[in-house]
Structure formats: structure tokens, C-alpha cells
Image (spheres, grey):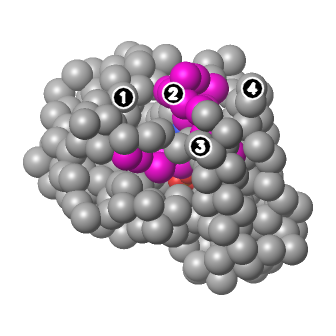
Amino acid sequence: MRGLIITIDGPSASGKSTVARGVAAALGYRHVDSGALYRAITWQVLEAGVKPDDMVGVTRVLAALTLEWLPGEHAFLFRLAGREPGPEIRSPAVAAAVSAVAAIPAVREWANRAFRQTPEWGGVVMDGRDIGSVVFPEARHKFYLDADPSVRAKRRLGEQTGDGAGAGLDGVLEALKRRDAFDRARREAPLAVPPGARVIDTGALTQAEVVRTVLDGVQTEEARR
Ligand code: C5P
């Protein structure tokens, strides 16, 4: 039976994944972290010695990749090329390369086909950059989380991985702004508020409050139908 689809988009470190996990757990749905798949593909590209903006090389790597979804209790994990990705997909090298790989149309088509399989197992809460606009434009529950870049940089610094790790707050802020600017400016599926999405500024809210806001939004809309 197909459950509901809830989409949560937004820029880096806006709290999307944590909130999506909380919403999925509360509803008995599964969380899909779409960025993790783009990061895992990027890691494979780097391992193959291919430059992230080498469209032909990246497409060749992609053609050899197999993906297996692993539906867990509250989340979808996956095996790419036979292995589950580990902390390496959060490394500064992957963070610096992922936007270029994710801007390649063949990569997006491949990933979108994979994302669209996940509701076959039940309700999903998927977070990313284009989930409400491109992957599931028909979803009736769409959210867009945002916060001031300095707030997001402080959060990312607290995680001590990924963008500008080890570079201090200014380095993290710069790396994060660079990635957001690239994601917003790309021709294919740019980062933007999807039509019909509810925008939530997470700057002054706790994660639990954001989860509550999303759940209230879903319940209000469902009651209206
Ligand atoms: O969400 P996360 O920061 O892990 O995403 C890593 C990168 O993957 C983003 O900066 C973006 O370039 C790409 N991405 C994307 N579309 C998505 C999710 C992530 O292009 N739906």
C-alpha cells in the first residue's frame, strides 16, 4: 500500500535530515536522505579517479553502479556498488565535489528514478533540494526549511564534518555559501522553494519544534480533505 509522501527541501545545514528523521519516526514512515545518494555517487567518482565535472567520466562510473534500497524501520539505507556508504561520504573532499556531480543531468535522472521507487514500500519523508519540485511534484505535503547562513554554519561547525571542517566558523560559512550558490544557480533542478511548499525558518526553533510544525501542517491538511 502506498503511504503519503512528505517532501522537505532546503539549503545545507538547514536541519532537513534531522527533522525528516523525526517526522518519519512519529508517523511510522521511512526517511530518505537524498543527499546521501548524491554523496555516495560522488565518493565512487572520486575513488575512480574521475574529476567531478568530467561529464563523460562521471557517466561512465554511473553506468557501472548498482543500487539496492534497504528499507529499515524508520529509514531507507542503501548499498551502492555492493557496499553501504560510511562516514567517508561526509568528508570535506566529498562535500567539495558533490555539487558538481549532482549538477550532471544523467546523475539526476539516475538518482530520481531510484528515489521514485521508495514509496512502493510505504510512506516516505524525503529531504533534499528538489524533492517537492522535481522528484515528487505531486506530493501534497511539501516543506522548505531555511535559516540564516551564519546559524547554519554554526550548526555545521558543531558536527565537525563536511563543509570546511577544521577551518573554523569563517571557513565553514564560506564553504556552505559556495555550495548553496552552486546548487541555486545550476540549470538542472536548482535549489528553490517548490511551488506549494510551506517555508519554515528554523533559526529560532528547536528541532522538536520544527518536527511539531511539520506534523501539524500534515495533520491540518489531511483533516481538511
Ligand atoms: O543534503 P546534503 O548536504 O547531504 O546534499 C549534498 C549535495 O547533494 C547538495 O549540496 C546538492 O548538490 C546535492 N543534492 C541535490 N539534490 C538533492 C539532494 C542533494 O542536488 N535532492
Q: Is residue 137 magenta?
A: yes
Which residue type does callout 3 highlight? Glu
User: What is the span of residues highlighted in magenta in the rendered image?
Assistant: 123-143
Q: Amino acid at mark 1?
A: Arg
| Mark 3 surroundings: few (<14), some (14-19) or many (≥20) residues within 10 A | few
Q: Which mark is residue 222?
A: 3
In this rendering, is residue 20 above or below 40?
A: below
- Residue 41 seen from this side: no
Question: Contact, CB < 8 Å: mark 2 with mark 1?
Answer: yes
- The answer for how far apart the CA atoms under marks 2 and 1 are is 8 Å
State which mark lies toward you, 3 or 1. Answer: 3
Which residue in the structure is indicated by mark 1?
116
Q: Residue at x 34, y 23 (%)?
A: 113
Callout 2 environment at 10 Å: few (<14), some (14 to 19), or many (20+)? some
Residue assigned mark 4? 195
Q: Left of 15 or right of it: where is 170?
A: right
Mark 4 vs mark 3, CA separation in Å: 19 Å
Element assignment for label 4 = loop
Q: List the residue tagged with mark 2.
A: 136
Q: Earlier in the sequence, mark 2 or mark 4?
A: 2
Return the x and y of residue 222 as percentages of the image width and height.
Answer: 59, 43
